Every structure is written in C-alpha cells, then in structure tokens.
Amino acid sequence: MTQWIIPYTLQMEIVRVLGFPDTLSSASLQSGYPFYNSELAVYQPYAMLQNKLAYLANAPTEAVRIFGAEHPAFPTFYVVASWSLNVTTPISIAANAMVSVSVNGGSSSTITTSGSETPTTLGTKIAASLGLSNMLLPSAFNGSVVAYASVPGKAGNGITIMVGSNDPSILLNGAQMSVGATSMGSDPPGEYLMDDTLTQPIWGYLPIIRALQSDILAARQDLLASKADVVTFRSTEVPERAALCNVMRRKLADALSVPLDPDIAGNRRNRGYGRSRVI
C-alpha cells in the first residue's frame, strides 16, 4: 500500500468532530506561548493530532478503523464470504423433478425441472432462487452455482444454505442433498454501524460520528409533539442521541491518543460545555 496523504478536508473533519477549537478561534490562543496565535494554531493538542495523522498516512489498518470506506485501502480488508454448489448428473435430468432451496433456516423455495433441463440451466435457476433471499448475490456458470454473501465478511458461523432434490437424476455436490455455509470472509477493521435503510453497514469512527450527528439534527422533527397518534416520542431523545455520539467521539479520541474537546485558553469553561482545559 502506497502512502496515503489524508486530504485536508478529512483532517479538518477530525478536528471538528473531536471538538478542537477553530484554528483562528481565540480558544486556540494563549499568551506566553510563541507562535500559538499563528494561522496554524500549533499548540500541544494540535501538535499531538497532527503527529498522529501523519503517522496514519503509512498505517492503513489503523486509518481504515477511523475513515472506513473513505480510505483507499478499505476494499483490501473486505472479503466476501462465499459458498459453492456443483450441479452434476450421471444421466439426463428428469422432468418435473423438484429441487428445494433453503437459506439460513428460512422457508424453502421449490424449483420444478423442465423436460429439457441441463445442469447449467438448473444451476441458473438455483442461483436465481438463492438471489430471492436478498442475502446472497449468486452467479451461475458451467453447471456450477457460486453464491456470494451480500452481507460483508463473516456472519457468525456463516449463512447456512441447504439444497436438495427428490430425484436421483439430480446430484448436488455429488449427492441429492447438499448443506454448507458461507465462509472465508473478512470484515474491515474497526467498529461499524448497522442501518436498515442502507445496503451496507457504515465502517469507521468518522463516518459513524457523522451519521450519529445527523441523527441528532434529524430528531428536531420529533420535538413538535410528545404524542402522535399511538406514537409517544422519547422526551430524552436528543440528549441520549448526543450521549451515543459522544461515546464514539471518545473512542475516536482514544484511537488517536488525543484529548477530546480541548480548550487551551479555557474560553468555553463557563458556557455549559464542560470542556477540560489542556495545558
């Protein structure tokens, strides 16, 4: 992996979500320290942060934990768990034979063979049946079905798949019944946020914090009423969402070994922010 220079915009996002003072803010100035009133505002917390960001340029594993899919090395850590099935037959496939497909213990789908069925056409039908589960993205070729899990990486002990036939003319991995599970997948390092509205989880502290901050602002719609039809909004929604967001902000600060919400001049201590002064 070649060196990745973190874009300035992402560096400033790190500064923002960690609660560092703006570089031109009086909160970043303190008399008696040389050059602290410069545009760069390089005082202790900023120096600590800039050193760590410079280190991350050559540390893709740690950087992916922070930036998630925004890091160019993210795809190298994402390996989809897979499962393969071979459709073979020693004789012609019988017409009106049935093949059942069950994914992860769910309800089975049934495929009925035609009079001109071949291993390739049957494999294609099984692939389409697996695709109906919305859990697998399959492809069929040369009589083989290779199903790829659409959920990233590993899912516990894998997604269990069972395919069986009621006719000896249809062999699946050499037998009338084949059972297996997706395996050999890997997830990117770090924490992730599951969201039912998204097709993939959100990886990385910075993208997760952005999503949580967006949730806080989105909660403004819930402040219009305490009850709506049969729904009663949580009166503590905003502070609880803010607390959840702060948990991830603290984890990001810990990952970077820098203080959270530093205020070297103490300008915010009496404004209800409760920020700790850094000397």
Image (cartoon, grey):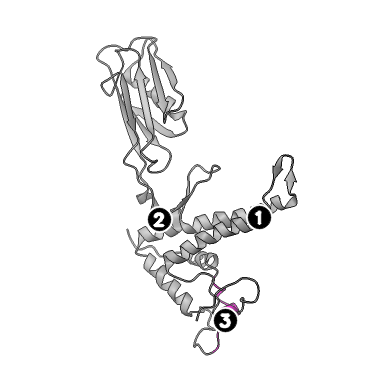
**In front here: 10 or 33?**
33
Image quadrant where residue 144 sits: top left
Circles 3 and 1: CB atoms closer than 8 Å:
no
Q: Is residue 144 visible?
A: no
**In front here: 92 or 190?**
190
Q: Mark 3 against mark 1, which lies toward the viewer? A: 1
- How far separated are the C-alphas under marks 1 and 2? 39 Å
Tell me where residue 28 appears, x and y as whole percent.
55, 79
- Which is more N-terminal, label 2 or label 1? 2
Task: Report which residue position mark 2 lands on.
Answer: 72
Q: Is residue 26 magenta?
A: yes
Task: Report which residue position mark 3 lands on.
Answer: 265
Q: Which residues are magenta?
A: 20-31
Q: Is residue 279 above or below residue 174?
A: below
For badge 3, the amino acid type reads Ala
Disc marking residue 217: none
For badge 1, the amino acid type reads Thr
The residue lying at 54 percent from left, 64 percent from top is 17
Secondary element at image label 2: loop
- How far separated are the C-alphas under marks 3 and 2? 37 Å
